[in-house]
Amino acid sequence: MEEVKKEFKPQAIVEVLEDGPIKITGNFMVSDSKRDIMDSPEEVYLCRCGRSGNKPYCDGSHKT
Ligand code: FES
């Protein structure tokens, strides 16, 4: 398993933050046709609680 980790070079890292959003960093694209979003940021926080007023992005509403 360790050997696989050393050789694997991801283009993006997806982190599920505890009680918060999904953080994605690296080389990726965000596409949301429902909201007409096509973006290629270096870092993004995607809402997974459903309360954000700025979906698909986290706006901090999960803290309330
Ligand atoms: S995860 Fe932050 S507003 Fe939903």
Image (spheres, grey):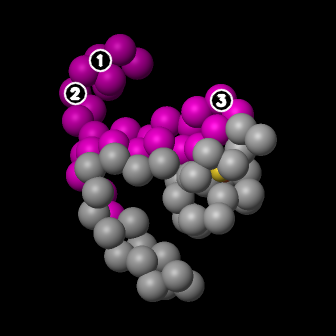
Identify the mark nearer the N-term, 3 or 2: 2
Most distant residue in the top direction = 2
Q: What residue type is labelled 1?
A: Glu
**Which stretch appears magenta?**
1-29
| Quadrant in the picture for the N terminus | top left
* Real-space Cα separation, disc 3 to disc 1, in angstroms: 28 Å
Residue at left 57%, top 52%?
A: 58
Quarter of the image where one finds residue 29: bottom left
Q: Which amino acid does label 3 sit on?
A: Glu
Q: Is mark 1 within 8 Å of ligand 1?
A: no
Q: Which of 36 and 26 is in front in this view?
A: 36
Circle 1 residue: 3
Q: Which amino acid does label 2 sit on?
A: Glu
Most distant residue in the right direction = 64
| Quadrant in the picture for the C terminus | top right
* Real-space Cα separation, disc 1 to disc 2, in angstroms: 7 Å
Do the residues bearing badges 3 and 2 touch, measured as CB atoms within 8 Å? no
Label 3 crowd bin: few (<14), some (14–19), many (20+), radius 10 Å: few
Q: Does the residue labelled 3 lie within 8 Å of ligand 1?
A: no
Circle 3 residue: 18
22 to 18, vertically: above or below: below
Residue 27: horizontal and vertical position, in percent? 24, 52
Residue 26, numbered circle:
none
Circle 2 residue: 7
Q: Nearer the viewer, residue 13 or 55?
A: 55
Q: Horizontally, is 14 left or right of 7 in the view?
A: right
